């Protein structure tokens, strides 16, 4: 998935009201950027961080910049736009390059299921069980090389795990897919200390599901100011 316009570097002044960020461009101008991330962004919104913005000339948009990346030392990046994972994964599913899902020919995003919920992707293929795939964007890292989810309490995430378990009980494939939007991590684990209820719901999704139960897939990403693409699987620490 390529960014629509060329990104420009900036320095973060502050993030506020969840969706706004004051930034300084390299030419010294101060601008306000849209932050497409409602989460805590733990460790990613410190003043002085080098970030990358996507400019736009859309007259319908009040803000002319969108915050897309945080740049770390060693040329590593974190993607902070929560809309990117589904866009990148849709392209990967349709190209048949996601391990274990290359035989699915129909990719249907944002399908209603469960109790007033929508699944990120419903995959279908001749002779195959329907695959319900819930996607979670992973940006937290508190230990070098280790990505974690969640970065704050997520009752909605726990609800999704319960609904996936019910899909598995009904005979479908049910998958929780963690997409690590960081290039400096090669392992993944749940942040049980941040949200014990989510960790418990994750365990229950397996204990209460029949057959194969809920599947876990964790994938890395290739990230640069040009775009974001899905990379190889990342081991999950248990």
Image (tube, rainbow, N blue to C red):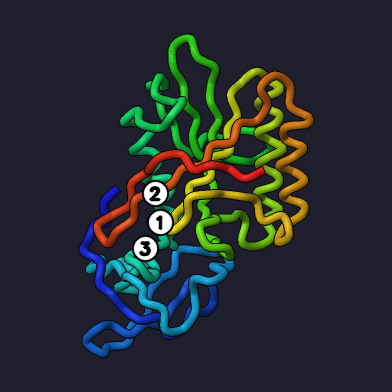
Tell me where residue 223 appears, x and y as whole percent.
Answer: 34, 55
Q: Quadrant of residue 77?
A: bottom left
- Work out which quarter of the rendered image holds the C terminus and state it: top right
Q: Secondary structure at mark 1?
A: loop
> Which residue is found at the position 44% from the left and 26% from the top?
101
> Which residue is found at the position 69% from the left and 60% from the top?
153
What residue occupies the far bottom of the structure in this picture? Answer: 28
Q: Secondary structure at mark 2?
A: strand
Tell me where residue 171 appears, x and y as whole percent.
Answer: 65, 18
> Measured along the vertical axis of the image, is residue 45 above or below residue 104?
below
Do labels 2 and 1 touch, CB within 8 Å? yes
Q: Residues within 10 Å of mark 3 (few under 14, many from 20)?
A: some
- Of the numbered discs 2 and 1, the one sitting upstream in the chain is 1
Q: Residues within 10 Å of mark 1 (few under 14, many from 20)?
A: many
Tell me where residue 40 appears, x and y as whole percent.
Answer: 58, 68
Tell me where residue 143 appears, x and y as whole percent.
Answer: 57, 63
What residue occupies the far top of the structure in this picture? Answer: 127
Do labels 1 and 3 touch, CB within 8 Å? yes
In this rendering, would 192 be left or right of 47? Answer: right
Disc 2 to disc 1, C-alpha distance: 7 Å
The residue beneath circle 3 is: 76
- Of the numbered discs 2 and 3, the one sitting upstream in the chain is 3
Q: Nearer the viewer, residue 32 or 74?
A: 74
Task: Give the mark count.
Answer: 3
> Which residue is found at the position 54% from the left and 77% from the top?
17
Q: Secondary structure at mark 3?
A: loop
The residue beneath circle 2 is: 221
The residue beneath circle 1 is: 183
> Measured along the vertical axis of the image, is residue 129 above or below residue 136?
above
> Which residue is found at the position 37% from the left and 65% from the top?
69
């Amino acid at each position: 998935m390529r960014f629509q316009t060329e990104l420009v570097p900036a320095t973060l002044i502050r993030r506020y009201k969840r969706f706004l960020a004051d930034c300084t461009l390299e030419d010294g101008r101060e601008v306000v950027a849209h932050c497409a991330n409602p989460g805590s962004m733990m460790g990613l919104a410190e003043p002085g961080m080098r970030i990358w913005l996507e400019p736009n000339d859309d007259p319908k948009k009040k803000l002319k910049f969108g915050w897309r990346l945080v740049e770390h030392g060693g040329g590593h990046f974190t993607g902070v736009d929560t809309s990117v994972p589904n866009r990148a994964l849709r392209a990967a599913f349709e190209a048949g390059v996601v391990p274990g899902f290359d035989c699915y020919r129909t990719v249907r995003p944002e399908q209603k299921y469960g109790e007033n919920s929508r699944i990120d992707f419903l995959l279908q293929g001749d002779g195959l069980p329907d695959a319900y795939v819930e996607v979670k964007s992973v940006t937290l890292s508190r230990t070098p090389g280790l990505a974690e989810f969640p970065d704050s309490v997520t009752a909605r995430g726990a609800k999704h795990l319960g609904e996936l378990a019910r899909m598995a009980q009904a005979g479908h494939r049910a998958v929780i897919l963690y997409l690590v939007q960081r290039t400096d991590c090669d392992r993944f684990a749940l942040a049980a200390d941040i949200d014990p209820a989510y960790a418990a719901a994750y365990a229950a999704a397996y204990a209460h599901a029949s057959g194969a139960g809920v599947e876990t897939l964790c994938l890395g990403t290739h990230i640069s100011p040009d775009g974001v693409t899905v990379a190889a699987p990342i081991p999950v620490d248990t």
